[in-house]
């Protein structure tokens, strides 16, 4: 089929407008000219099959040209790649034109295929997992994001993007079932607050530390309490809505609310019992969350930081110096716990081990917060046999001694490296070179 002549017939028959035809041609160019204009119009729902067949017959009668569309291998391509990636234990999958398919297992990237993928294969995968409309969206935008839901295989998020070499797809792969708080390394002292407490609970981590997976588990825990109204505001949460005793509603930032601060303001007018925030990384959202927690609600939020102390310092830095004494008092009154979750490669190198630093805010921690001596919180968490929490270095030490992680990786993550080495007693008996 000659697409240019088919386009002329479409315009001549007034089936589509010239602007629509130009958009189709742009989408066709993005896909490497592997898909005909007729196919694209069918995918977009602009014409039906019967109309297209009549135009093809007219085209053949005029120019006696027949072109057979290539077979669509989208389903086979998509299923085999996703299933292979999931079977290999991959956390991420990347498909890019002219390169082998790559997966991230534990902390390392490795090829899933030995041969580079071609442009038609990439686009077949995109259409299969994200829908035909993504082609038109990419013609207008630089990237498109969708939820990934493959029953019996995995769930997650998938992003198609344009770059210098063409088009690439990145899929974040997660198990269909939501992990429990215990499986994710969250201590019972923190998880229990999600069902029977009021105030502010902060979960903390860095990029690539499993934020979406953790928040899905947090929401499932919050939904357990009977007769509770829970609102979740997030931008990436893709897990199914939890089924529990609570009434749970979810709003996606960018779709149901412009940003976290405006979404939280609207939510507070509904007077929910508990709120889950996918991020409190800006000043307005953090301040609103703190005020909401002071008002008697349970507010659970995620902040990007690497430790309990770093998290609290960042929160205080949202305010001018003149306001910080007031904010420290508010934190002392409203904050219930801070839980920091890191992922460290296992000693075998085939999985990620959660390493958790956490602080439960009791009388001692409140006194420290009021006086602003945040460095003292680390010493407070290190006190053996108390219920104030546990420091990152303590947990790294335990995991290294139990041979769950390598001493080298524990050392790289530790905040007080001298303390860690002293507790590990590293030396000739360890056989470790740092």
Image (cartoon, helix red, strand yellow):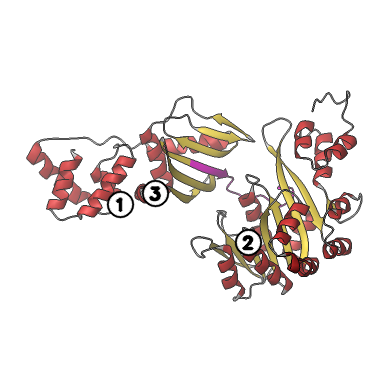
> What is the quadrant of the N terminus in the image?
top left
The crowd level at tag 2 (other Cα within 10 Å; few <14, some 14-19, many 20+) is many
Q: Position of residue 352 (x, y in %)?
A: 68, 38
Image position of 413 with respect to 323: above or below = above
Q: Residue 277's mark?
A: 2
Q: Is residue 126 magenta?
A: no
Dot 1 falls on a residue whose secondary structure is helix
Residue lying furthest left in this view?
Answer: 62
Give the mark, 3 or 2, whose residue is nearer the N terminus.
Answer: 3
Q: Is label 3 or label 2 in front? A: 2
Task: Please name whichever residue, 226 or 110, is drawn nearer the observer in this view of the structure.
Answer: 110
The residue located at (62%, 55%) in the rendering is: 216
Q: Residue 44's mark?
A: 1
Alpha-carbon distance for marks 1 and 2? 36 Å
- Would residue 320 appear left or right of 426 to someone viewing this image? left
Alpha-carbon distance for marks 1 and 3? 10 Å
- Would residue 108 appear left or right of 428 to someone viewing this image? left
Give the mark, 1 or 2, whose residue is nearer the N terminus.
Answer: 1
Task: Kindly check if marks 3 and 2 are in contact, taking CB atoms under 8 A apart as contact.
Answer: no
The crowd level at tag 1 (other Cα within 10 Å; few <14, some 14-19, many 20+) is some
The stretch of residues the image draws in magenta is 170-186
The number of discs equals 3
- Would residue 51 appear left or right of 387 to someone viewing this image? left
Q: Residue 131's mark?
A: 3
Alpha-carbon distance for marks 3 and 2? 29 Å
Image position of 61 with respect to 243: above or below = above
């Amino acid at each position: 089929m000659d697409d240019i002549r088919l386009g002329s017939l479409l315009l001549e028959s007034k089936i589509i407008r010239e602007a629509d035809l130009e958009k189709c041609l742009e989408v066709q160019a993005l896909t490497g000219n592997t898909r005909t204009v007729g196919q694209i119009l069918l995918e977009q729902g602009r014409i039906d099959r019967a109309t297209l067949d009549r135009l093809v017959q007219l085209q053949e009668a005029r120019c006696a040209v027949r072109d057979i569309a290539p077979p669509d291998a989208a389903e086979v391509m998509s299923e085999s790649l996703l299933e292979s990636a999931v079977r290999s234990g991959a956390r991420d999958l990347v498909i890019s034109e002219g390169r082998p398919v790559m997966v991230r297992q534990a902390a390392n990237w490795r090829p899933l295929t030995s041969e580079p993928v071609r442009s038609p294969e990439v686009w077949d995968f995109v259409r299969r997992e994200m829908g035909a409309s993504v082609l038109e969206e990419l013609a207008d935008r630089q990237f498109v994001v969708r939820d990934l839901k493959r029953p019996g295989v995995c769930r997650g998020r998938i992003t198609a993007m344009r770059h210098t070499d063409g088009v690439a797809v990145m899929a974040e792969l997660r198990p269909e079932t939501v992990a429990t708080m215990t499986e994710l390394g969250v201590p019972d002292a923190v998880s229990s607050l999600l069902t029977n407490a009021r105030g502010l609970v902060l979960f903390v981590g860095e990029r690539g530390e499993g934020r979406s997976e953790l928040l899905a588990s947090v929401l499932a825990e919050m939904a357990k309490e009977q007769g509770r109204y829970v609102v979740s505001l997030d931008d990436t949460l893709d897990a199914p809505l939890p089924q529990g005793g609570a009434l749970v509603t979810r709003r996606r930032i960018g779709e149901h609310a412009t940003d976290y601060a405006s979404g939280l303001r609207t939510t507070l007018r509904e007077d929910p019992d508990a709120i889950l925030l996918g991020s409190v990384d800006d000043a307005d959202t953090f301040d609103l969350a703190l005020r909401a927690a002071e008002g008697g609600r349970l507010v659970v939020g995620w902040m990007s930081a690497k430790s309990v102390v770093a998290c609290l310092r960042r929160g205080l830095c949202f305010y001018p110096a003149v306001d910080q004494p007031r904010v420290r008092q508010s934190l002392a009154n409203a904050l219930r716990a801070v839980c920091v979750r890191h992922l460290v490669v296992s000693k075998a190198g085939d999985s990620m081990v959660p390493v958790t630093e956490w602080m439960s805010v009791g009388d001692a921690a409140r006194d420290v917060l009021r006086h602003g001596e945040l460095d003292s919180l680390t010493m407070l968490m290190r006190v053996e046999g108390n219920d104030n929490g546990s420091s990152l270095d303590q947990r790294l030490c335990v995991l290294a001694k139990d041979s769950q992680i390598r001493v080298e990786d524990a050392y790289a993550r530790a905040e007080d490296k001298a303390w860690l080495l002293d507790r590990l007693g590293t030396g000739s008996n360890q056989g470790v070179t740092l």
